[in-house]
Amino acid sequence: MKSKFMASALALTLGASVALSGSPFLAKAEVGQEKKYIVIFKDQAKLPTNFGADISKAGGQIEAKLDKLGAVEVVSTNPNFLSQIKKSSTVLDAGVQNIVYPETAAIEAQAMVTEAATGADLYETLQWDIKQVTGDGASWKLPGGTGKSVDGNDIVVGVIDTGIDYNHPDLKDNYAYGKSFVPGYKDAIDENGHGTHVAGSIAAKGRTMGVGPDLKVAAYRVFGPTGGAETSHIAEALMTAADDNVDVVNMSLGGYDWFQNPDYATKDTVADVRLFNRAIQYAIQKGVTVVGSAGNNAVDISSPGKLSGDDNGATHRSPSSQSLIRVSAGGQLKNLAFYSNYGVGKIDVMAPGGDLGPNYDPVTKTGRDNTYLCLATVPGGYAYYGGTSMAAPKTAALAGVIIAQHGKDKLSPAQVKHVIQSSSEDVFKRGYDGEAGFGLINAVNALK
């Protein structure tokens, strides 16, 4: 994807904390310059015999092994590493490793919250988004509606993100565990805020509430305090979550893959996409419902050519597997949020992600009303965010309560996805459309 697109062309300048969720590609390798690559083998269930010898012969050193995905992360100073490793009869794809970022909130605002109070006071007064999904809490009165499973087993939503503030009073009772995949950071504690906000939308139970206040959340931390994460680390986190038998995974990640990057041939960039797809399929085959955000660039992601702007080639939203549930963001008035990506065949459902109200003009930046944003937990308190990052976890939580109603491991991910889609509220064109997919999620309809 062209650097100017990555840097600024579609950035949302809102007078608040804003960042474009893009994925800058590594520069072309030069002699003596160490670069990271992904090597995908033909057998996607295991690594071939003597794979290490082929890597070494091509001038690479294995950084990490993803045995169950048939892939390895490699570092090399050989500028011809890719062409040489592809000569191996066991290799399916090899390419540069992408960097993925948390799907940075399109809009952020400080929440002016008073001192400690009792009860769900902030839910009652400020969380229009949770009320919209739950029918003002009506879904909590239905079997499984809070996320408490009918069979007594914990229903766990894995949050692949910046970590979770497991000390937050609204989250600590529903925090299951945490694992970090960030080099140099062993703790899954959130030092950014994004993952805690996501977790609060799922399972907060205190002054704020989540869609499933009795669901459990598990932190799979892939992002440090700043910066992005390599694809292999995210794939490892997703694979680990599946092996841990979580029920749902939320990935509010910001990534794009630009095919025909001038620094690399298209064939050198597809390995990254294939690894993501393998990891997603691995999780789904193990019974995990995978949910992802649509992105905050206000673009049609169904048109890879248009998404590349005046560049050649095709740009795809990443992860881009058709097996996951892709979520666009809606506002309090059941409108498509002005920053939300959209696209026929790319959006499954819409969920509340927040915006700045009906009087806001994105051009003049006037008429802003922060109460139309989504309030949820952040380390040490609460904050208003707006973004598809805020929409996806509500859908992940809905998947969790649907599972809770039937019992752990009783429904397949395809069945969960079907219930979410078929129970959604038709808000735009009759039937399916590219803005809301099958419609706005509705927990009461889903549980009935």
Image (tube, rainbow, N blue to C red):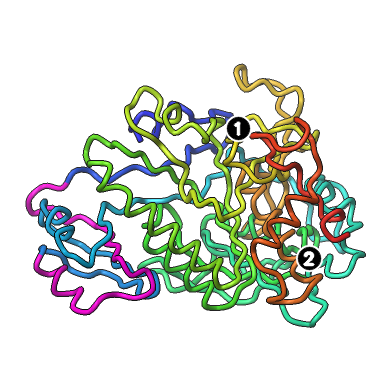
Q: Nearer the viewer, residue 280 or 389?
A: 280
User: In whole angstroms, how far apart are the C-alphas of marks 2 and 1?
Assistant: 28 Å
Span shown in magenta = 29-57
> Could you tell me which residue is drawn at 77 percent across and 65 percent down?
401
**Is there any visible trace of residue 167 in the rendered image?**
no
Toward which corner of the image does residue 435 lie, by quadrant? top right
Q: Which residue is mark 2?
A: 213
- Horizontally, residue 256 falls left or right of residue 63, namely right
Quadrant (top left, top right, bottom left, bottom right) of the C terminus: bottom right
Q: Any mark on residue 174, and which?
A: none
Does 290 sit above or below residue 18?
A: below
Asked which secondary structure carries label 2, the reply is: loop
Counting from the top left corner in percent of width and height, residue 259 is at 33, 39
- Horizontally, residue 209 falls left or right of residue 94, namely right
Q: Residue furthest bottom?
A: 152
The reply to whether callout 2 and callout 1 are in contact (CB within 8 Å) is no
- Say what amino acid the circle numbered 1 marks: Tyr
> Could you tell me which residue is drawn at 86 percent across and 47 percent down?
125
Q: Residues within 10 Å of mark 2 (few under 14, many from 20)?
A: many
Counting from the top left corner in percent of width and height, residue 217 is at 65, 69
Q: Earlier in the sequence, mark 2 or mark 1?
A: 2
Counting from the top left corner in percent of width and height, residue 212 is at 77, 63
Does 82 sit above or below residue 237?
A: above
Does 28 sit above or below residue 395?
A: above
Q: Nearer the viewer, residue 394 or 267?
A: 267
Per the image, is 280 magenta? no
Q: Nearer the viewer, residue 250 or 58?
A: 58
Q: Nearer the viewer, residue 4 or 112?
A: 4
Q: Residues within 10 Å of mark 1 (few under 14, many from 20)?
A: many
Q: Which residue is mark 1?
A: 339
- Say what amino acid the circle numbered 2 marks: Pro
